[in-house]
Every structure is written in structure tokens, then in C-alpha cells.
Image (spheres, rainbow, N blue to C red):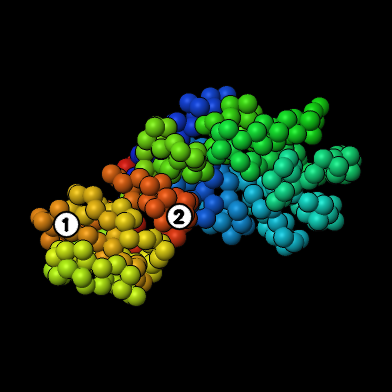
Amino acid sequence: MSRRSWAVIDLDALRHNLVRVRERAPRARVMAAVKAEAYGHGAVEVARALDADALAVATLGEALELRQAGIGRPIVLLGGVLDTDELHTATGQDLQLVVHDFHQLGLIERSACAHTAAVWIKLDTGMHRLGFESGAMPELCRRLAALPALRLQGWMTHFACADETDNPATCRQIETFRQMTAGLPGARSLANSAGILAWPDAHADWVRPGIMLYGASPLAGCSAESLGLRPVMTLRSRVLSIRELPAGEAVGYGGSWITPERMRVGILAIGYGDGYPRHAPSGTPVRVGGRRTQVVGRVSMDLLAVDLRGCDEVREGDEAVLWGEGLPADEVAAAADTIAYELFCAVRRKRVEYVYAGRPNA
């Protein structure tokens, strides 16, 4: 059966991007973010391919999937646990927990777990999403000291504006973190992908790369190519049909795009039901038959139309690239008023076949 739409995941490119992480932060250990199915790339496959020091996920279910697949490396549960049952399961699977509030700490204090809880403490240094604020530090340290069954891994925070290299907020967060953790035992972890690339003072003991591993840029106004990153996912489809339309004809739902002249319009076998962004406007770049062109009209659930002017050699069945090799995801994301993270995570694995290229194991 012929593929209609498929995503090629280049594991060698993934490993190349990890090398770039280690070059930028040579003294730090690497906690690779593989949450949300490794940003849509396949968590188990990515975890097996990456020689990272630890892996980071958002939920207990994501962590258990990796353990059930035989992944034995340290796994950090970034969201922590919700209740005692999750706590017992997580400690039984040797997961490291992020504790970000006193409710979670209370679960550990009241628990009769048979296993020691390995814990990262998350501090709120200015993002105001999760974490202990500076005023909570005396009580936090007192309660941590009273928990002999708790194994402190270290302290972490998350940056709000690290992608904006001229924004002083990140410097303030780094300094706040230093003040909050001064004299305390344990490792330090601050830097996400943007922090790794733009804020060397934030590298500390552990870095937590996410989007840069997958070949997209975390920095505003800076391309992935200029950062030495390679695209890992290339989303492909095929030309399902070619229409020859006269000037003045409307294309797609709502007739929002009108042919400016007599022209060929190609219909690709992919749409928002496959994860392509429905809100991508006319003009969003796409490559068809090796040539660069653009989306025209509204994206449908299963189909999208493309401009075939200048693509006279394109025929039904030819391949198209929606993003990836030869067409940066960041560029497509910008045209669709979104970010590459969302493009990757939106791809539907039940509709889009995943093809893994390169060596499968690190």
C-alpha cells in the first residue's frame, strides 16, 4: 500500500543535535526532554537513539511507557505526582520526581513508600508557573531536612524569556536562583534549549534541551541552520490530484483564494486531520516535486491545495515536503503564526506513518 502522508525521523540528525548541545555546554550533564512523544517524534524511539545522561517527561504515563520499553536510564518526572498512588508507582519504578509545591512535599511526608523518593526541587525565579518562591525557602529547607527517606537530586528552575537574547529577565532569574540556592547541597539545572545556546551562565550542572534536539531554533530571529542544527522530522505527502483552473476561480472552503491567472493547482493528501495546521494561510511555503511553492486556500481535514505555477513537471503521485529537509519547520511555523513545537506535536501518528532512518540505538 502506497504511503499518502508520512514523517521521516532522522535519528542520525537527532544525535548530531545532541552533539551540538554537548559542545555548547561541555561541563554539564544532559537531561533530554522526551515529553509529548518526544515533541511528536516518538518517545521510545528517541530515547533509544539518544545517549543522554537522563530523560525528562511530563507525566507518569509517559515515564511508564519508557520503562515498559526497557529504558533503564534516569527518568525525571517534570510535573511530579498528583497523589499517593502515583507516588508509590513512581518510586517503585525508580523515577526522579520534581516537587514544585508543599502539597507534593506533603505526599512524600505522609507516605509509607518502600522506596526512597529521589527528588528535584523546582524554584519559581520569575516565570510564576510552578515552583517554590523565595519566601518559602526556610520552611522548605526545614521540611526537606526532616525527611531521611528523601534523596535530594538538586534544584531546578525554568526560564520565561530565554529565547529573547536582549531581555534582562533571564539575568534576573539566574541571579534569583543563585541567591535562593546559595549554600544548599545538590545539583543545579536552569537551562532549556534557549538557555544552552544564549545564556552560558545558566549551564550549571545539568541542561535540559528540548526543541534544539529536534532541529528547530529556540531563539527568536535565529535559524536552526545557523546554530548548526539539523532537522529531525521531515513531513511528506503526495500529490493526489492536479486541476487546471482558469483565472478568477475560487479554491477551497469559503472561496478565500482566487486564481490570479490560468494555472495548475495541486491537491496534497494531507490536512488538519493529519496534524497540518488548519490556520496556515495562503502563502505558507511547501515543496512539491523538489520545487518551492505555496499553500493556496483553506486547509481541509484531509487535503490542502498548492500553487503549481513554475512546477510544470509535477505529476500525480509526486512527493511534497510540508516541513523538514529543505524547508525549515520554523519558517512554516512563522507563516502559520505558531511555533515549531506545535507543528511537531500535532502530527497524528494514527494517520501519518512514521519512518525511522539512521541507527536505531545510541
Image side of residue 88 versus residue 350, left or right: right
Residue 20 in picture, x, y percent from top left: 45, 31
Q: Which mark is residue 337?
A: 2
Q: Counting other residues with Cα less than 10 Å from the Cα at mark 2, is it few (<14), some (14-19), or many (20 or more)?
A: few
Left or right of residue 193, residue 19 in this image: left
Q: Is residue 40 visible?
A: no
Of the 4 image quadrants, the one containing the C terminus is top left
Element on which disc 2 rests: loop
Residue 205 position (above or below residue 213) = above
Query: 35 or 160: which is nearer to us?
Result: 160
Residue where numbered disc 1 is placed: 309
Query: Label 1 amino acid?
Result: Arg
Residue 174 to residue 112: above or below: above
What residue sits 49% from the left and 40% below the top?
220
Residue at 37% over, 61% down:
281
Q: Residues within 10 Å of mark 1 (few under 14, many from 20)?
A: some
* Left or right, residue 356 beside residue 156: left
Residue occupying image coordinates x 54% and y 31%: 198
Front one among 297 and 43: 297
Whether residues under marks 2 and 1 lie with C-beta atoms below 8 angstroms apart, the answer is no
Q: Relative to 206, does residue 148 appear above or below in the rendering?
A: below
Nearest the eye: 169 or 259: 259
Q: In the picture, which quadrant includes the N terminus?
A: bottom left
Residue 191, x across and y down, in percent: 60, 36
Say what secondary structure mark 1 lies in: loop
Query: Which residue is the extreme one toward the bottom?
Result: 254
* Callout 2 amino acid: Asp
